[in-house]
Amino acid sequence: MHPAPSVIFFTVFSGLGFGLLTWLGLGYPAVTGWTAFAFFAIAYAMAVGGLLSSTFHLGRPERAIKAFTQWRSSWLSREAWCAVGALVAMGLYGAGLVFLGERYSLLGLIGAALSMATVFTTSMIYTQLKTIPRWNMPVTPVKFLSLSLAGGALLSGQVTAALVLLVIAGAVQLLTWSMGDKALAASGTDMASATGLGGIGKVRAFEPPHTGTNYLLREFVHQIGRKHSQKLRIISLVLMVALPVILLALPFSHFLALLAVVSHVAGVLTARWLFFAEAEHVVGLYYGKR
Amino acid sequence: MTTLPAQTDKKLGLVIDLDTCVGCHACVISCKGWNTENYGAPLSDQNAYGADNSGTFLNRVHSFEVQPQAPDAAAQLIHFPKSCLHCEDAPCVTVCPTGASYKRVEDGIVLVNESDCIGCGLCAWACPYGARELDQAEDVMKKCTLCVDRIYNENLPEEDRQPACVRTCPAGARHFGDLGDPDSDVSQLVAERGGMDLMPEQGTKPVNKYLPPRPKDAMPEFDVLAPFLEPVAQEPKGFLGWLDKTLEKL
């Protein structure tokens, strides 16, 4: 899959933003007044910034409002509802904390649940696609949720929780890589089933439909990134999990915590780039490519 | 509404004969010609006369080489037209967030209401066959309409009321009809020739069927005397033999 910057930015920052909102909704840290304002400002900048970034992926963003209509069948539509619900609930809850110094715990819990629901629906947009076996696994939503909770814990300064959750998220990430590497072969879709010609013999792509490239090849057959995938996996895991865990384990200072956040975000961006770049869409088989 | 209908009154679709297709790409051209000036936005080309050209097509013809398992069997070249299969369980429809993609109850045709399309591309991601392409000029999703503006068009002569690709095919490799009716010509053709689904494991239940190439004839022994003839000498003798040995030594 083509690793579009708008979608990488969207999934990474909305995941972090809604992760932070989840922790704030649960009352960790129990802040009020201007401290609460600062936390909520960071969370909203990330969540809303991520959502706005996703509209750059649209051909016709001026019609984006129509995406609220098909929640019965479409995960993308459900995500739109969950995101707006979470932002409204957490906005009211945050206003109570910042301006009234009041904690409406039930509203916070609802906001936290909707924030996690937003991350879950985002992950289901990718998980539902049978055409991309690497994503079409139950572990995909687990990865998005564990990363979002870990990132949220890191941003909200929950050191112990962040240490545990980062390690869990790293383990889930390793699991998705090892399962994902076998997913295409396990799906049973290959050139033989794509063409129905496997009964005659070994199928080879002889001539593509056109001498030039096309939308399908640009969007679905991205092979450049896979060359360095093993190195990038190590880099992303070190930045996303190992370095933040070491920095958090040291005696606490705000500077080290900031470094941990920067390292984590860089690691998640790298891993998310790989998430797209490594994903093989079955349509590539018609072109003899993966 | 992007939920799929439980069932459709008809299952209009195509039957494509891989034994007959000669790979001339006439269906590609007639498809682009008709659909760029009729239903919905035109099918744009980018940099059409430059080195790096590409464009939107609703129908593309691949060519595959198939090498049979038998040790001395010749490879077969199979031309393979591919367009929307108008699946019964169309994953492209249910993922659509706006309701722009839908499957018609009356005939099962999968269409895009372009004025509702936000160009998110998710339907193209969900399609295993590469049947949908996001037009780079209009930024909306384009796909085969089964020439919905021809097949019911009473302004056209009756023989033209079929998809442009079927009408134009010079080899008769494309057939159009109701695959939901077991007595229709296309259904009988599918039954007779063992019509198949592409990627059945994806669970899309395509309406379009492909007729596999017929088995090739075995080459007959042309010359009854051939088995009695001496094989041509493989080892050179005399002067050529000396030359061969001498050159080997150098």
Image (cartoon, grey):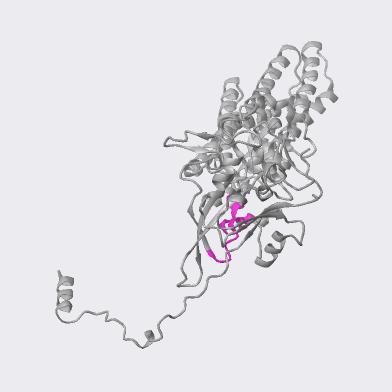
Q: Is residue A117 above or below residue B17?
A: above
Placement of the N terminus of chain A among the 4 image quadrants: top right
Considering depth in this image, is B202 or B227 the residue closer to the camera?
B227
Magenta-span inclusion, residue A198: yes
On the question of residue A226 being in view, the answer is yes
Count of picture labels: 0
**Residue at left 74%, top 38%?**
A74
Can you tell which quarter of the image residue B32 is in?
Answer: top right
Magenta-span inclusion, residue A113: no
**Residue at left 76%, top 62%?**
B183
Considering depth in this image, is A286 or A105 the residue closer to the camera?
A286
**Magenta range:** A181-201
Q: What is the x, y in percent for residue B123?
A: 67, 40
Whether residue A237 sits left or right of residue B11 in the image: it is left
Q: What is the x, y in percent for residue A123?
A: 69, 38
Can you tell which quarter of the image residue B210 is in?
Answer: bottom right
Whether residue A126 sits left or right of residue A208 in the image: it is right
Q: What is the x, y in percent for residue A192?
A: 58, 59
Q: What is the x, y in percent for residue B220?
A: 47, 79
On the question of residue A156 being in view, the answer is no
Q: Furthest-bottom residue in view? A: B228
Whether residue B19 sits left or right of residue B7 in the image: it is left
Considering depth in this image, is A115 or A210 the residue closer to the camera?
A210
Q: Is residue B207 above or below residue A140?
A: below
